[in-house]
Amino acid sequence: QKEVEQDPGPLSVPEGAIVSLNCTYSNSAFQYFMWYRQYSRKGPELLMYTYSSGNKEDGRFTAQVDKSSKYISLFIRDSQPSDSATYLCAMSGAEEGAQKLVFGQGTRLTINP
Amino acid sequence: GAGVSQTPSNKVTEKGKYVELRCDPISGHTALYWYRQSLGQGPEFLIYFQGTGAADDSGLPNDRFFAVRPEGSVSTLKIQRTERGDSAVYLCASSITREETQYFGPGTRLLVL
């Protein structure tokens, strides 16, 4: 079993819909949680960064972390065609030597005009 | 400002050959990371540098892979006796310090024939 599980999709929704993306993980040492967006043939771009549990909102994007359930989510409101990309969850620990990011498989998202 | 740059953007080589992949991190970033991303998968950690030293090389798959960062800035990932299974996108990321956000470059797409 992988440390981080993410449904690869693909996920296709109409423009304006609310999108929910999720990851589960098994390592209780993870403290930092991130969502990256990756367009085709580009490097991952950081969208959201959260430390420990709780919610964080940035414009149309909301990240949620539930450490008790080992479950993180990214919500996209009023989705746009430009949001079409692969979304990767990533996480890391806080202790020395735990700086490496552990990624999910990525969910391929298409927003249809 | 300039982001992380990687050269070459694409590399095609033959099985058994030696390749070098270069990463120029964001100026002033002391931490540098290499990841490998296979098709349809999330990036997987290879090695992490803090300054000139490799602080964590636990992700290198075998002794054919080696990386250096002699002056604490540019890094080179070296692969000896390439195999077809080495074909992937090699991503470099940098951060100001090990605790801070990792910014990714566009990657080098390696194809071993």
Image (cartoon, coloured by chain):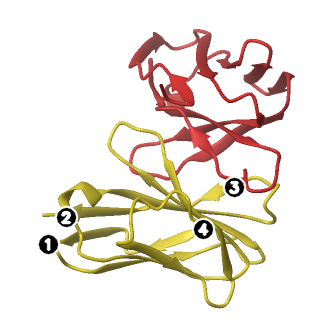
Chain colours: A red, B yellow
Chain at numbered mark 2: B
Q: Nearer the viewer, residue B80 or B41?
A: B80
Q: Nearer the viewer, residue A113 or B93?
A: B93
SS category of the residue bearing label 1: loop
Number of marks drawn: 4
Name the side, left or right, on which B17 lies relative to B98: left
- Please provide percent x and percent y for residue B111: 23, 62
Give the foreground label among 3 and 2: 2
Chain at numbered mark 3: B
What amino acid type should be assigned to the residue bearing mark 2?
Val
- Label 3 – label 2 distance at C-alpha: 28 Å
Q: Which residue is mark 3?
A: B102
What amino acid type should be assigned to the residue bearing mark 4?
Val
Q: Which residue is mark 4?
A: B4
- Label 3 – label 1 distance at C-alpha: 32 Å
- Please provide percent x and percent y for residue A83: 54, 29
Give the foreground label among 4 and 1: 1
